[in-house]
Image (tube, helix red, strand yellow):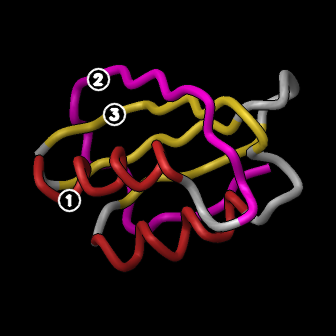
Amino acid sequence: MVRVRIIVSGIVQGVFFRFNTMKKAHEFGVTGWVKNRRDGTVEVLCEGTDQDVQLMVDWCAKGPEGSFVSKTAVTQEKYTGEFETFQIVY
């Protein structure tokens, strides 16, 4: 199991990025959260299998229709297993 933090830059706020990220996380079977940051980026913290987390990373690099992702920064972290589901945090 792995844990990654993804910072997504571009046109990613006000385009349902968080909601669609949550839907994809449920589809891929990863846990964690997504939130908007004050600097206009979106932050995703997710845990799951290598394969499922990679699906999430790849999806975040493209984003939902209506968004424009200019950059993703992915940081590996120590897996904790602390999450039971994936949610939007504010």
How far is mark 1 from mark 3, CA to CA?
Answer: 11 Å
Q: Depth check: give the residue in front, 19 or 77.
A: 19
* 24 in relation to 42, above or below: below
- Whether label 1 touches label 3, CB < 8 Å: no
Q: Is residue 4 left or right of residue 50?
A: right
Secondary structure type for disc 1? helix
Give the quarter of the image for residue 4. top left
Q: Where is residue 80, by image quadrant?
A: top left
58 in relation to 5, above or below = below
Which one is nearer the viewer's eye here, 79 or 35?
A: 35
Residue flagged by tag 1: what amino acid is it? Asp
Q: Which residue is mark 2?
A: 77
Which mark sits nearer the N-terminus, 1 or 3? 3
Camera-side mark, 2 or 1: 1
The reply, left or right, for residue 32 in relation to residue 65 is: left
Position above or below: 58 against 78 = below
Viewer-side residue, 83 vs 51: 51
Of the image marks 3 and 2, the number of the one nearer the N terminus: 3
In the image, residue 70 lies at what x, y percent?
62, 30
Q: Categorize mark 1 by other alpha carbons within 10 Å: few (<14), some (14-19), many (20+).
A: some
Q: Which residue is under mark 3?
A: 4
What amino acid is found at the position of numbered circle 2 in the picture? Glu
Give the residues in magenta: 66-90
Taking the image as shown, residue 6 lies to the left or right of residue 83, namely right
Which amino acid is tagged 3? Val
Magenta run includes residue 19: no
Residue linked to disc 1: 52
